[in-house]
Image (spheres, grey):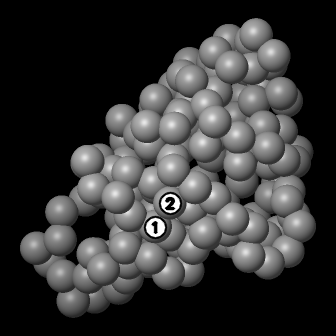
Amino acid sequence: MANRVDTLVATSPIKCAADKFYNFFKLNMNELVKIFPLAFTGVEVLDGEEGTVGCVKRWKYIIGGIPVSATVKIEVIDDAAKSITFAVLEGDVLLLYKSFKATLTVSEGSAQWTIAFEKSTILTPPPELYIPLVITICTLVDAFLLVN
């Protein structure tokens, strides 16, 4: 199978300021464990410093009712574009995909997640379970930031 990277895109409206929303994901993303405990059950910084390129974390989360984990590296931070790219280095998602990256781009009134993935086989389905997860993350983080 040729190395073909596919993408899924999910966009969510946000009411809080774009800078505040973006900075949450850049500097305080570990708080997802408190904000969304039904999906995120643990996080640990393995290497690097929070909010910097190269920071590596081990996330424990639930997707489709199944507990999974992923080691994720911040690959790109673009403050001007309010964009962060996270790359999965190891974990359960790589059982189905050769590569898996998620990019968050924030603008006033909107947060967009772009999931780039390379299927392991032609029969591998797209990671559509991640779409409702990222939309729910945006909704809950937005609500949290509006009151905090």
Q: Which mark is residue 95?
A: none
- Give the image quarter of residue 92: bottom left
Residue at the image point whose x is 69% and y is 65% from the top: 44
Mark 1: few/some/many CA within 10 Å (<14, 14-19, 20+): many
Q: Which residue is drawn at 43% across and 37% down?
A: 38
Please tell me which residue lies in front, 12 or 66. 66
Disc 2 residue type (three-letter) = Lys
Residue nearest the observer in this picture, 136 or 13: 136
| Image spot of residue 15 (x, y percent) | 68, 12
Where is mark 1, residue-wise? Answer: 69
Q: Which picture quadrant has residue 72? A: bottom right
Under circle 2, the secondary element is strand
Residue 139 in view, yes or no = yes
**Spatial distance from mark 1 to mark 2, Cα to Cα?**
4 Å
Task: Report x, y in % for residue 101.
Answer: 52, 65
Q: In this view, does 31 lie above or below 144?
A: below
Q: In this view, does 55 lie to the left or right of 35?
A: right
Residue under the point 75% across and 30% down: 21
Q: In which quarter of the image is the C terminus?
A: top right
Is residue 54 at all visible to an observer of this figure?
no
Q: Mark 2 — residue?
A: 60
SS type, badge 1: strand
> In the rendered structure, which amino acid carries the disc numbered 1?
Ser
Q: Which of marks 1 and 2 is nearer the N terminus?
A: 2
Residue found farthest to the bottom: 1
Question: Front-most of 97 and 6?
Answer: 97
**Contact between labelled residues 2 and 1, with CB atoms less than 8 Å apart:** yes
